[in-house]
Image: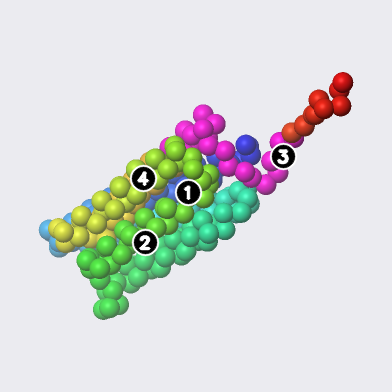
Amino acid sequence: MHPKLKRCFICGQYANILFLVFAFLACVYYWLIERHQLELVPLEIAAYTVETAGFVFMLFSLINFHRIVRHRYVMKTAMLIYLITEVVIMILDFNAEKLPFYNSASMVFNIGHSIFSAVICFTYLALEPKNTALETAIIITEVIILSGMFGVIFGMHVYVTLFANSIAYVVFFSIMRFLLSQERIMIDCYGDRAKEYKFKSSFFDE
């Protein structure tokens, strides 16, 4: 196993912990506006600062995957698309008042965001196909991600789906770190030494 492989999952875990903090701060921010007509700019700045830090860790995770893990081009591309999409959503949300076409509480938007995130998560199966432990981790993650769609029923903000996504990926990356520590998943990386097999025949021994 590559000595720096765990870094990929550690960065991903930290990124989503920060997204959890952002989702909480954002929910408090909008709750204060809706209930008390109180707009706290410092809280908004803190929320977006935390989210930006999360994107930095996500980028580090992506870079490490590209530098360390062999192949998995579909998974790596999906990770990049996910990162770009989330950044675009952040920019749209930050400028929501200036963009009448953007509605973060839209049912279609929330459902689409959850399904999109679930599809991205599915590509992690490429890490080691037919590994039961990995498949179980992904199933758990998918269930948590898709549960975010229930927020749509209550007309809640898009941060409900972000909250569900963040919890799901924190769980996923935590499980992956555990599987790596127990050597229950083997991911081929650049620089790994190929296993050498010696074949010997006893046909000519007599």
Task: State the extent of the magenta-drawn residues as a range.
Answer: 175-196
Secondary structure beneath disc 1? helix
Relative to 107, say whether 184 is above or below.
above
Q: What secondary structure is found at the residue carrying circle 4?
A: helix
Q: Which dot marks residue 194? A: 3
Label whose residue precedes the other's in the sequence (1 or 2): 2
Classify residue 51 as left or right of residue 106: right
Amino acid type indicated by mark 4: Ile
Task: State if disc 2 and disc 4 touch (CB < 8 Å).
Answer: no
**Few, some or many C-alpha atoms within 10 Å of disc 2 (few <14, some 14-19, many ≥20)?**
some
Q: Main secondary structure of the magenta part?
A: loop
Q: Gap in Å between the C-alphas at discs 4 and 2?
A: 15 Å
Which mark is on residue 116? Answer: 2
Sequence order check, earlier mark of 3 and 2: 2
Please provide percent x and percent y for residue 164.
Answer: 30, 50
Marks 1 and 2, how far apart in space?
16 Å
First in sequence, mark 1 or 4: give its number.
1
The quarter holding residue 95 reads bottom left
Tell me, yes or no, whether the two marked residues, 4 and 3, touch with CB atoms within 8 Å. no
Q: Which residue is mark 4?
A: 139
